Every structure is written in structure tokens, then in C-alpha cells.
Amino acid sequence: MTKQRQLIYNIVNSTPDHLKVEEIFSEVKKNNSTMVFATVYNSLNYLVENGYIRRIRIPGLPDHFDRNLQPHDHLLCEECGNLIDVPSQEEKLNFFDANGNYYHKKQVLYYGICYLCQKKL
């Protein structure tokens, strides 16, 4: 793995938060002022494609990146915007349905209010 990819991987793995590209780029700039945004973006794609990290796509929002590769779902807090890991029900994947569609992974996103925001209400 290149030094740039290793740095980005370390940044994603250094926090339980689900960072966006811009947040990762900001952290990169603290450590490597010469790296450009395209390198960060391309490195994130490489890390996702090779199974080092997980991309979380949320309609209408930037992608987030997750260090947790274990099966789990997410809660998007509608108050603060934080993305929180939620235990998921284990499901058997790698199957075909009656129409011939093949299922190999899933992503579930819940919308609600996190426990920290509920304390403020």
C-alpha cells in the first residue's frame, strides 16, 4: 500500500466517526500538505474496492467512510446529522430470488434522533 493510502486508511481507522471526504482531506492536510483532493478521493475508492474500509451512501448527502467492516446498519440523526452504528440482524446473503436477482450485500439506513440529541429535547 502506498504511503498516501496508508495515511488515509489510518485517518479513517483512528476514529469511530463516519468521516466524509472533506473531513478526511482536512486531516490529510495536517499531515501531508502536498496531497491533493483527487489523491484522497482516489485512495478512498481503492480502500473501499479492496475491502479495507466501507463506503456509506446516503441519498442527498456526501458519502461517509466507515472502519467497521462487520455487518451492521446505521442511524442518521435528523437533529445533529451524526451517523451511528446500529447492530443488524444477521441475514443470509449470496442468494438468488425467484426473479433471478442476486443478493450479496445490504445497507440499511435508519432515520431518527440519536440518544445525545434526545437528552437535549
Image (cartoon, rainbow, N blue to C red):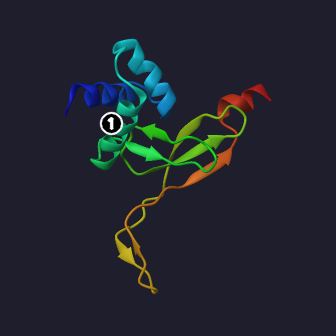
Q: Residue at x 61, y 51 (%)?
A: 59
The residue positioned farthest toward the bottom in the image shown:
98
Q: Residue at x 30, y 24 (%)?
A: 7
Q: Position of residue 63 (x, y in %)?
A: 51, 42
In the rendered view of the protein, which quadrant contains the N terminus?
top left
Would you name the residue on which mark 1 appears? 43
Q: Residue at x 60, y 34 (%)?
A: 82
Q: Is residue 58 above or below residue 121?
A: below
Q: Secondary structure at mark 1?
A: helix
Q: Is residue 93 above or below residue 83?
A: below
Q: Choose top left, top right, bottom left or bottom right for residue 95.
A: bottom left
**Looking at numbered disc 1 in the image, what kind of residue is underneath it?**
Ser
Q: Could you tell me if residue 1 is visible in this image?
A: yes
In the rendered view of the protein, which quadrant contains the C terminus?
top right
The residue positioned farthest toward the right in the image shown:
121
Q: Choose top left, top right, bottom left or bottom right for residue 103.
A: bottom left
Which one is in front, 13 or 22? Answer: 22
Q: Position of residue 43 (x, y in %)?
A: 33, 36
Determine whether, in the image, residue 108 is placed left or right of residue 53.
right
